[in-house]
Amino acid sequence: MYEGREGEILSWQLHGFGDASKQAYCAVVYLVCVTTRGIHVSLLSSKTRVAPLKGLSIPRLELPSARILTVLMNTVQNALKTQIKIDCVRYWLDSMTALYWIFNNGEWKQWVQCRVTEI
């Protein structure tokens, strides 16, 4: 373990958040360093997209945010894998509907099914 002025490093974590609104959807990844002297958080990367002009519901827009979150998180993990050992990776979405679609193998409409398959 590294011992610096910030204390001994106990773990490295990645936390990714995805969210959507009627205007845009986004994903962001934070690096969390847990040390003996506290927790240090740094913004690593983010990605934003403008929502389609075709009016989609917020749960449907949460699926593309989850998709760009998974792509962004994989990119960050690949970039960091030679630098540090990540102990924990967490994905966060605030849409229960989108989470239900992702974690359940149902007969969804084609648009939803394509996004869930990509994730």
Image: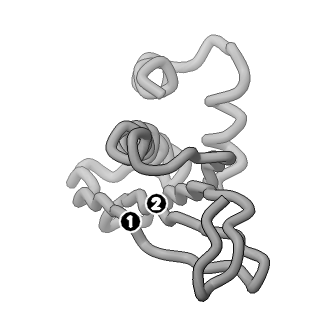
Q: Is residue 67 visible?
A: no
Give the residue type at disc 1: Leu
Mark number, residue 44: 1
User: Quadrant location of the N terminus?
Assistant: bottom right
Q: In the rendered image, which residue does mark 2 sit on? A: 29
Q: Is residue 78 left or right of residue 99?
A: left
Q: Check the image and report above or below for 60 versus 118.
A: below
Instruction: Indicate whether 26 appears above or below 97.
Output: below
Residue furthest out toward the right:
36
Name the residue at 67% across, 43% down.
97
| SS for dot 1 | strand
Residue 112: image location, x then y, percent: 48, 27
Residue at 51 percent of width and 25 percent of height: 116
Its colouring scheme is one colour
Packing grade of label 1 (10 A; few <14, some 14-19, many >=20) is some
Is disc 2 in contact with disc 1, using a CB cutoff of under 8 Å?
A: yes
Corner quadrant of residue 105: top right
Q: Is residue 71 visible?
A: yes
Cα–Cα span, label 2 and label 1:
6 Å
**In percent of the image, x 75 and y 85: which residue is there?**
37
Q: Under tag 2, what secondary structure?
A: strand
User: Percent from the top left, x then y, of residue 43?
Assistant: 42, 72
**Of the pair 16 and 82, the residue shown nearer to us:** 82
> Three-letter amino acid code at disc 2?
Val
Q: Nearer the viewer, residue 22 or 66?
A: 66
Between discs 2 and 1, the one toward the N terminus? 2
